Image (cartoon, rainbow, N blue to C red):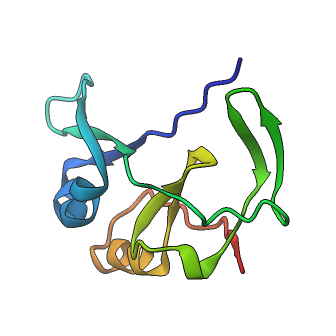
Amino acid sequence: MWFFKTILVFSESALTALADILEPRGQLLPVITESKRKKFYGYYPTNPLSGCFDKEKSIYDECPNGFVVDKPFLIAQNITDEYLFSVEEDMSRIFVTDKFKQRVEDANLLGFDFSTVISIL
């Protein structure tokens, strides 16, 4: 049995800068750490989109409880969120748009890795 759940961890300053994007699209919970100076929050998206996953072009295995996706391809015209989303077929990934990336860069936030580019058709 496989369980993949993606949870992002945000600092308090990142949460402040991105709250308008994160709060309506997911669940935030405090992360307990030993730090007395910094607070962190775990984030899990609750807005999976349907119709965005291209089954013909993506590389995946179908399992009894869903898909295990090695290489996703997304259908651009069916992506209805401007910033951040997951897809029903692959809840283990969180996809972000260029608009989200720009907000992170504009806020001078550190620790984000945007090096993986997903094919969009």
Q: Check the image and report above or below for 42 versus 104.
A: above
The residue closer to the viewer here, 13 or 29, is: 29
86 lies left or right of 54? left
**Where the N terminus falls, by quadrant?**
top right
Query: Residue pushed farthest top?
Result: 1
**Residue 106 at x, y percent in the picture:** 31, 80
**Residue 41 at x, y percent in the picture:** 26, 39
Q: Check the image and report above or below for 74 versus 26.
A: below
- Using the rendered view, name the quadrant where residue 84 is placed: bottom left
Q: Check the image and report above or below for 96 versus 24.
A: below
108 lies left or right of 72? left
Q: Residue at x 14, y 29 (%)?
A: 36
- Using the rendered view, name the quadrant where residue 66 is placed: top right
Q: Residue at x 56, y 67 (%)?
A: 114
The residue closer to the viewer here, 14 or 22, is: 22
Q: Residue at x 66, y 64 (%)?
A: 116
Q: Residue at x 31, y 73 (%)?
A: 108
The residue closer to the viewer here, 104 or 83, is: 83
83 lies left or right of 55? left
- Using the rendered view, name the quadrant where residue 78 is placed: bottom right
**Residue 27 at x, y percent in the picture:** 28, 42
**Where the C terminus falls, by quadrant?**
bottom right
Number of numbered discs overlaid on the protein picture: 0
